[in-house]
Image (cartoon, rainbow, N blue to C red):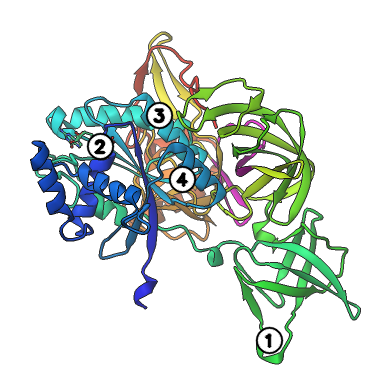
Amino acid sequence: MENNREVLKIVVVGHVDHGKSTVIGRLLYDTKSVPEGKIERVKKTCKEKGKPFEYAYLLDAFEEEQKQGITIDTTQLQFFTEKREYVIIDAPGHKEFLKNMISGAANAEAALLIVDAKEGVQEQSKRHGYILSLLGIQKVYVLVNKMDLIDYSEEKFNAIKSEMNEFLNNLRVYPLKYIPISAFHGENMTEQSVMMPWYKGEPVLAAIDLIEKDKGVEDKPLRFPIQDVYKFDERRIIAGRIESGSLNVGDEILISPSNKVTKVKTIEYWQDRDKMEAVYAGMSVGITVEDEFFNKRGEFITHIEHAPYVSEVFRANLFWMGKNPLIKGKKYKLKLATQEVECEIITVNKVIDASTLETIENANQVKTNDVADVTIKTKEALCFDEFKNNQSTGRFVLVDGYDVSGGGIVSRMEKGIQTACTLVHKGLEMTVHCFDEYYFILSEGTVRKIPGKTGVFSVGDVLPVIGGTYSYSENLDIVNLESNRVAKIRKSVLQEIVSFNEYQYGSFDLIESKGSLIKVASEEDFKRFRSDFELWRERAGKTAEFANRWFDFMKNHEIKYREVANLYTLEFEI
Ligand code: GDP
């Protein structure tokens, strides 16, 4: 079992000199992951050069060895905690990192974004935030480093936190934690810092152990793209590879995009000893179904409650490697899982130079080695998932003539303009406004609501529990009394949606879907609340009386001042 340890791949990003290497060096050092002798060597070199020792040099030492070919492969720096193994994905440059991530060669699940407390948020911090958003990395911690340079001030930490959070939220990146640290002095790295008693969270090492790994492909919803259909002694055998989830004989299945429902009759086998009642992600299989429609290559078999997106238009981030530039309106072939369709780029929303990370607006073409945020239209309906939910059915390639010229990931389904944030689970939808922001607009003398984070969040997605003007606990239950639904959020992640009638109080904060805390602190309170609610519903009206009795809006909110109302003029929008 010893090789069965969990591995979490993380990427460390941030503006140059904000402390990435020092953080990494510290983590390696503090977890005793630096080979014997290396520290001594680095210390000796420093002494010879008359420089003080720096943890960052440990990393240089690794890189140096890599360049000289001394070690076989240390592009991946590793360290261990008691819980698991960590691999730091350390690309030589942004270009390689982006290319590797988009093509699937590297896949970081989590990120540490380092910000210098003294310098605050810089251009590069923003660009790196943008990369995280581009790649759909959801599990992000922001480490506010060099706290020693600002006297470990809580106030200044909070100011940076607000600024960074507002920016990242606009990019749909919702950091799970902000940790004040001094990597150089080892404050809040492995142990609680005595210099910052006001910080009540975990130090970095304990905090990263709390990051929950994405579900394995076997535990995700079933995705079985049809590779081929063979006619075999009067039976039609559907063949393909199970990309995720599992499939059982007797399962009710949906075939998309033709939208047919049937049941799995058999899972085929060559010899009796291969006979199986269930097949799992990673297996190549042949099945027969009860109603033999005309299935064809490219279609997706899924379970009914977890249908894929089916659309002709979607938004994607792509890495272009073609000899010729990618041109808006030109026809390309798009391959996603086993589907092949003609497509064109209808909008180039933004182009990013992968080396400098500079963005270019209103571009009409995408040059070699550029990354672009584009809207793609296919000639026929395509089945897909958002990359963040399913990598194999959220990733595609573009073919120009005969050459694979670009790799991309689906960032989202284009559903028109959304005005709120929707939570979905097993066909249950819940529209919530608790992530909206409220500001006192000085020029108007009024409080205004700025619709917050629009988008669709499904089970497993990280929710924006910390905003610019609100902050909820990471475990909470959002109650929508109108639709009678409750969404359970654990560790900032949407866990499930249940009906209010079935819901059992679990000692977590109850937040009404518009953002008020429901004043319930015990099972008893909850029972009273429920019966009061039933009464109120029967009588109808007197809503304010009911709300005044049970709700507390200000508990998790503050109303900040703003000069003018046009708050969210987006610098970047994905
Ligand atoms: P990188 O470019 O992001 O990898 O940054 P480095 O880790 O190389 O750090 C840049 C400089 O900041 C180095 O001189 C570090 O010693 C210094 N530094 C890193 N962390 C801290 C810190 O917590 N406090 C102070 N005062 N300096 C730090």
Residue 126 is tagged as: 3
Q: Give the residue pinned by disc 2.
A: 19
| Labelled pair 1, 3 in contact (Cβ < 8 Å) | no
Indicate which disc, 1 or 4, sits on the residue closer to the N terminus.
4
Taking the spot 74% from the left edge, 48% from the top edge, the residue there is: 382
| Labelled pair 3, 4 in contact (Cβ < 8 Å) | no
Indicate which disc, 2 or 1, sits on the residue closer to the N terminus.
2
In this view, the residue farthest toward the bottom is: 272
**Can I make out residue 434 in this image?**
no
Instruction: Find the distance from the CA under tag 1 to the CA under tag 4.
Output: 39 Å
In this view, the residue farthest toward the top is: 443
Indicate which disc, 3 or 4, sits on the residue closer to the N terminus.
3
Q: Nearer the viewer, residue 324 or 260?
A: 324
Q: Amino acid at mark 4?
A: Ile
Q: Check mark 1 vs ligand 1: CB closer than 8 Å? yes or no.
A: no
Foreground mark, 3 or 2?
2
Instruction: Find the distance from the CA under tag 3 to the CA under tag 4.
Output: 15 Å
Foreground mark, 2 or 1?
2
Q: Nearer the viewer, residue 40 or 394?
A: 40
Q: Amino acid at mark 3?
A: Lys
Q: x, y percentage for residue 291?
A: 85, 70
Residue 137 is tagged as: 4
Indicate which disc, 2 or 4, sits on the residue closer to the N terminus.
2
Q: Which residues are magenta?
A: 406-431
Foreground mark, 2 or 4?
2
- In what quadrant does ligand 1 lie? top left
| Labelled pair 2, 4 in contact (Cβ < 8 Å) | no
Instruction: Find the distance from the CA under tag 2 to the CA under tag 4.
Output: 21 Å
* Secondary structure found at label 1: loop
